[in-house]
Image (cartoon, rainbow, N blue to C red):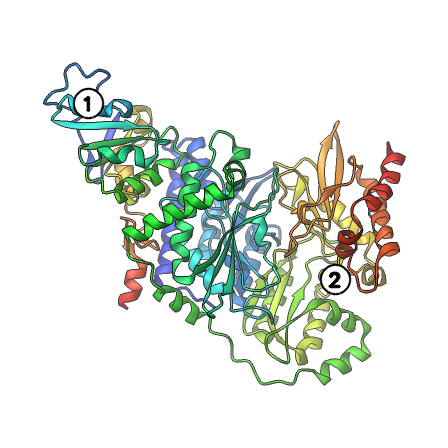
Amino acid sequence: MYAYDEFDRQIVRERVAQFASQVERRLDGSLTDEEFRPLRLKNGLYLQLHAYMLRVAIPYGALSARQLRQMALIAETYDRGYGHFTTRQNLQYNWPKLRDTPAILGLLADVDMHAIQTSGNCIRNTTTDCFAGAAFDEIEDPRPTAEWIRQWSTLHPEFDWLGRKFKIAVTASRQDRAVLKGHDVGVRIVRDADGETGYQIYIGGGLGRTPMEGKLIREFLPRAELLDYLEAILRVYNLEGRRDNKYKARIKILVHEIGLEKIRADVEAEYASIVAASPKADLREFHRIQAAFDAPEFADLPEVSRKLEQAQANDPDLALFVEHNLFRHKHKGYASLTISLKGIGQAPGDANAAQMRAVADLAEKYSFNELRVSHKQNLVLPHVRLDDVAEIFAVLKAHDLATANAELITDIICCPGLDYCALATARSIPLAQKLSRHFGDAATQKDIGELSIKISGCINACGHHHIGNIGILGLEKKGAESYQITIGGDAGDQFAIGELLGPGLPETHVPEALDKLIAVYRRERRQGETFIETYRRIGLAPYKTAFKEIADAFA
Amino acid sequence: MLLLDRNGAKADPFARVETLDDVAGKAVIVAFDAAEKLLAAAPAQAGVFAPNTLDAEQLSPFLDRLALIAIAFPSATDGRGFSLARQLRRLGFKGILRASGPLFSDQFPQALACGFDEVEIPDANAARQPVQQWLDALKRVTVTYQRDYAQGERILDRRARS
């Protein structure tokens, strides 16, 4: 794993001191509230509905045991004993006090962490595949590229006052597990015909009020050119992106309005000027970073673990866990293990301090001290021996972390909603909990199979509802919460924005509406077909008909 | 207006003028639209005031004849001027680049890094943020990951040396 050197540390310490000075200057009146607000946000500090919220950066979702323990300590000392993992692989504290934030930032800096650029109109945390460095299907570990981008984008003097936020995702697998096409820029690591490794670049994707699919702007970019090319994209966006309307300021709107060909021409022209003016970027820094991500020393193990097979035979719960929560590893005898933060009836993405410590211990003991946060709001032990899975499962079970539901209907993505968020128009967590209980039976979940539910409490779409197989958007209608349901969204390679099924429903009717949709799937599915595959084959109409029964009954 | 560069407050040798009646032999700044006419009127030093929506290419025919370009920052959060400054430097502009608008001191190092020489801020802002705050702002973050911006010590060069 990448380890900070003295310079990385220096920049974090200096940034903490800079923020402390900004707070002081706000308090003595040097800075107006309007001036202070973006400075506070660029350091991850939001003013929410009931309290401040501090969003801590977890670059590309990678954590060490020591770092997670520090998060636990902060949760206990300065919050209400828990933290919330987000769709951007970050962690949010929902109840910190403003006066405690310098102390929290100091504790974070002690373990090489920070809250830099977790909000504000700047380049945000770069995200990647939660199985990075472990996945059987990756061309290479995408984390070095993500770290390269992290450094380049940190405290960038030119791109700190963009028209709107800017999010970059990286993946190195054919199967997209990083929602590449839902980002302002998506970077896919590929090999060209000569075997050279480089990047395929997507631009202008995004969710929010106006969901758009990212478009391919560059088929193949040699590795050495990545940062210069990103600089060109950012400069074109900074200069040309709309500034007249906050809701039309993302790069997706620019791409939509001027067209892919024009933005490509602009970016390529700017890129040519950059290259002509300064010597080509060199790869020394990339190679330094890549060396830091050297793979752990994996043992030579048999493909199957007799030990695990035997344990599974004696424990059906373990067997179910193995079936759903293990992901194929690039080394024989290992797996990546998903720790679900979606216990039945729990708030998605929340973990308490005791759970964090238990997971940190497991990472240290069984996974080369490595952890990942997934955009699905779960934790991952990337490198565990199959032989150790039963022991890990027992520890997880003791901490209510052994829910066997990765990728299943109760693995719900959900934003904080009206329970916390100042922007929300409806609650989302209570609905997620209700659906989790409604579909919580293990046999039911297994029968329904892979199905993603994503819930947002307002049109800003932090819960990614547009790209849920079933998406739920909470709105306020005549003083009451109303939930719009979409179907057919897909976050992966067959990226798709869901289709609206009909008018919004009250929370009480949502489980029944989902039952109807799932009944259509059960009736129509062919052998081995997942929910989304059946939908793609038979289309929207049958689901709309089924939905109408509920909508009519309510109306 | 307070004018300052990396050494502190300074007197403005340029005068903002609306007409070209009496500019010969003087250092003046006019709106960009009047650049051609200003240069024809033979001032001692010619400066223009450019909106941040101007394309750098539109300025390029004048770059070797202008002593100063002031780029407008309509608000502190509108960062277009930073990129425009970068492009003007890349096009070879050697004169003074001035950022003009309600910036605040934390943006001073960013402006200098992008190629500006000085900033000009409204009196009301200067009253809240005295010159010392602007100079202090330059010392807060002393290292940088970016390779070719004029700020702090470059981490990548330090790493390459060690």
Q: Where is residue B79 in the image (x, y as percent from the top left)?
A: 39, 37
Mark 1–mark 2 distance (CA, rounded to whole Å):
72 Å
Helix, strand, or loop for circle 1?
helix
Q: Is A533 left or right of B18, judged from the image as shown?
A: right
Q: How crowded is mark 1: few (under 14 residues within 10 Å), some or many (20 or more)?
A: many
Q: Residue A405 carries which label?
A: 2
Q: Is B27 left or right of A411, judged from the image as shown?
A: left
Same chain under badges 1 and 2? The reply is no
In the rendered image, which residue does mark 1 sit on?
A: B38
In this view, B42 is above or below A8: above
Q: What residue type is labelled 1?
A: Leu
Q: Which chain carries label 1?
A: B
Q: Is residue B12 visible?
A: no
Mark 1 or mark 2: which is in front? 1
Which image quadrant for residue A444?
Answer: bottom right
Which image quadrant for residue B102?
Answer: top left
Q: Where is residue A205 in the image (x, y as percent from the top left)?
A: 56, 46
Which image quadrant for residue A284?
Answer: bottom left
In this view, A531 is above or below A487: below
B24 or A3: which is nearer to us? B24
Helix, strand, or loop for circle 2?
loop
A520 or A515: which is nearer to us? A520
Q: Position of residue A62 (x, y in %)?
A: 53, 62
Which residue: 88% across, 34% down?
A552
Which residue: 38% across, 53% down?
A228
Q: Which chain carries label 2?
A: A
Q: Position of residue A217 (x, y in %)?
A: 49, 50
Q: Residue A91 carries which label?
A: none
Q: Give the quadrant of the C terminus of chain B.
A: bottom left
Q: Is residue A67 visible?
A: yes
In this view, A156 is above or below A324: above
Q: What residue type is labelled 2?
A: Asn
